[in-house]
Amino acid sequence: MPDSLPPVAAEPVNIEPPVSALDAMLTPADILFTRNNGTVPDNLPGWTLSVTGLVARELALTPEALRARFPTVEIVSVLECAGNNRSAITPAVDGQPWGPGAVGCARWTGVRLADVLEAAGVSPRAVYVGFRSPDHVIGKPGVEALSRGLPLAKALSPETLIAFGMNGAPLSALHGAPLRIVAPGFPGSAWQKWLREIVVLDREHDGAKMTGLDYRMPRHPLRPGQDPAGTEFDVITDMPVKSLITAPLEGFSTPGPVAVRGFAWSGHVPLAKVEVSADGGGTWHPARLEPGASPWAWRRFTTELAVPPGPVTLLARATDMAGKTQPMDPPWNPRGYLNNAVQRVGGVVAG
Ligand SMILES: Nc1nc2c(c(=O)[nH]1)N[C@H]1C(S)=C(S)[C@@H](COP(=O)(O)O)O[C@H]1N2
Ligand SMILES: [Mo]
């Protein structure tokens, strides 16, 4: 990774770019945030992907055999960590203290997970697929770092890939080479990297970080700071509507009118609109919304705001087709997931 992207924690490797680096339709591989719950497996010889569990025919495929056997598809999709912008949540919560940059959008190349599952012959009893990888907890060889999965319906959905490429190049080690899951609309945690095993199951997978408070949301809202004991949690299966102002940047100084731009995206419910405010949310102005490269890609928004000279805070608010909109303040939960609160960018309009 470039020296310009400082790790927010030394070990495991977790790296977040500044918002200024995210102002591109496709996020370059060395700019995209990286999240690793344990070690980063690299250059492992003789990689084989196995498909086992409730299948008619078990499969064992090298990455080359996978590419030769199934059609190659490409999809542009946002990848966002469920904990993106967790650091803005109060009272503070445990977890990687991400700012707003644990998100990006890339072109992913791979094969459909559905095609591979079809070749294996999924049993009618199957409801879930589990994933396994060789990364382990730092200092604890043999202890799985992360073993996530997908509901069968999402595993069979055409946008869900086993990817080997990103932005036209082979996947890098940090982004999951040789094979990773791409699950558009799901949180980054479901995008299993260094994929080596797919297990077809008749119940929700219970691998590392599938249970307890990990990547799960309370079924009913909690008060900020509330003890979650006795609360039921569900695996996160959809990402909320959200926007990111990429220009101007915090601390800007510019003459008016102020040109505002950024990106907006949502999970499984398509995006409807983006609005921008320069008066703390009193009035909202519609932004132009450009088409996305795919239904799963982020979309550029732009607008110019006539703002009187002086200090100003810019806000952007996206709304999805179901009418859900970004809240003004972060919703609280014990691990600080799914913070899609309206972002605030402060600066000065010169007279
Ligand atoms: N095997 C494995 N896969 C993983 C992880 C991990 O720790 N181990 N982290 C997950 C999480 S929490 C996120 S947000 C994404 C990040 O993908 P990236 O590093 O390519 O940005 O990978 C996911 N896949
Ligand atoms: Mo994540």
Image (cartoon, rainbow, N blue to C red):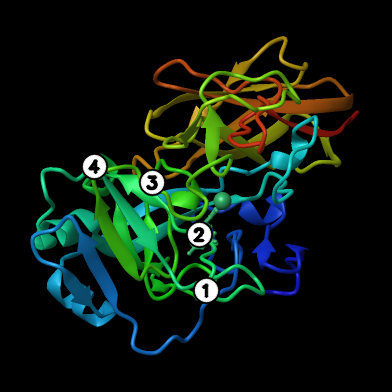
Residue highlighted by disc 2: 146
- Distance from disc 3 to disc 4, alpha carbons, whole Å, reads 19 Å
SS type, badge 3:
loop
**In the displayed structure, does residue 332 sit left or right of residue 293?**
right
Residue highlighted by disc 4: 127
| Residue 142 x/y as whole percent | 52, 73
Which comes before the other along the chain, label 3 or label 1? 1
SS type, badge 2:
loop
For image coordinates 66% across by 57% down, the residue present is: 21
Q: Is mark 2 within 8 Å of ligand 1?
A: yes
For image coordinates 46% across by 48% down, the residue present is: 78
Say which of marks 3 and 1 sits in front: 1
The crowding category of the residue bearing disc 2, from other C-alpha atoms within 10 Å (few below 14, some 14 to 19, many at least 20), is many
Q: Quadrant of the C terminus?
A: top right
Q: Nearer the viewer, residue 98 or 72?
A: 98
Type of amino acid under label 3: Pro
Q: In this view of the protein, can residue 262 be seen by the observer?
A: yes
Residue sitting at the far bottom: 45
Q: In this view of the protein, can residue 159 be seen by the observer?
A: no
SS type, badge 1:
loop
Type of amino acid under label 1: Gly
- Distance from disc 3 to disc 1, alpha carbons, whole Å, reads 30 Å
SS type, badge 4:
loop
| Residue 195 x/y as whole percent | 38, 67
Type of amino acid under label 4: Val
Q: Are marks 2 and 3 in contact (CB under 8 Å)?
A: no
Type of amino acid under label 2: Leu
Which comes before the other along the chain, label 3 or label 4? 4
Residue highlighted by disc 1: 142
